[in-house]
Amino acid sequence: MLRWRTAKRLAAWMHAAVSSDCHFLAQFARVLRRDLAAVKQAITSRWSNGPVEGHINRLKMIKRQMYGRAGFELLRARVLPWNSAANLEDSCTESA
């Protein structure tokens, strides 16, 4: 369903999931029924927040790696693109 962005078989899948022996799958399907319109929209929409989630994941990883090791300037240098970080260093040395 997700790969081809079609919600045609969603109702059949949810019925099979609810009647499944797997408690967690059945509970998941019951929760999805609460906002079925949003679930259908999420399946059929061509928009994705994947790139945003990837950037957030990258920033959190950098933050975890640097916890307690260095100050804000090193964090800024690791987060900003290389060209911007080089320009930032140049502007800092000119003002000093």
Image: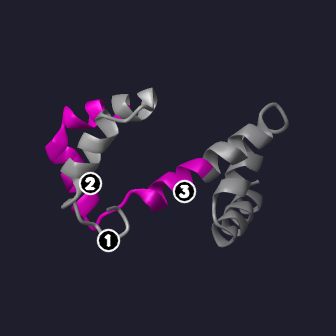
- Majority secondary structure of magenta residues: helix
Q: Residue furthest right?
A: 69
Residue 7: x and y in percent read 21, 59
Q: Nearer the viewer, residue 17 or 51?
A: 17
Is residue 56 highlighted in magenta?
A: yes
Residue 28: x and y in percent read 36, 34
Residue 16: x and y in percent read 30, 43
Q: Left or right? Give the position of 82 relative to 23.
A: right
Measure how far apart labels 2 and 1 are at the Cα level: 12 Å
The label shown at residue 42 is 2
Give the amino acid type for the residue marked by disc 3 in the picture: Gly
The label shown at residue 53 is none
Q: Which residues are magenta?
A: 28-57
Give the amino acid type for the residue marked by disc 2 in the picture: Ala
Which residue is the site of mark 3? Answer: 54
Query: On the image, which quarter does residue 47 sit in?
Result: bottom left
Tag 2 secondary structure:
helix
What colouring method underlies this structural image? one colour
State which mark lies toward you, 2 or 1.
1
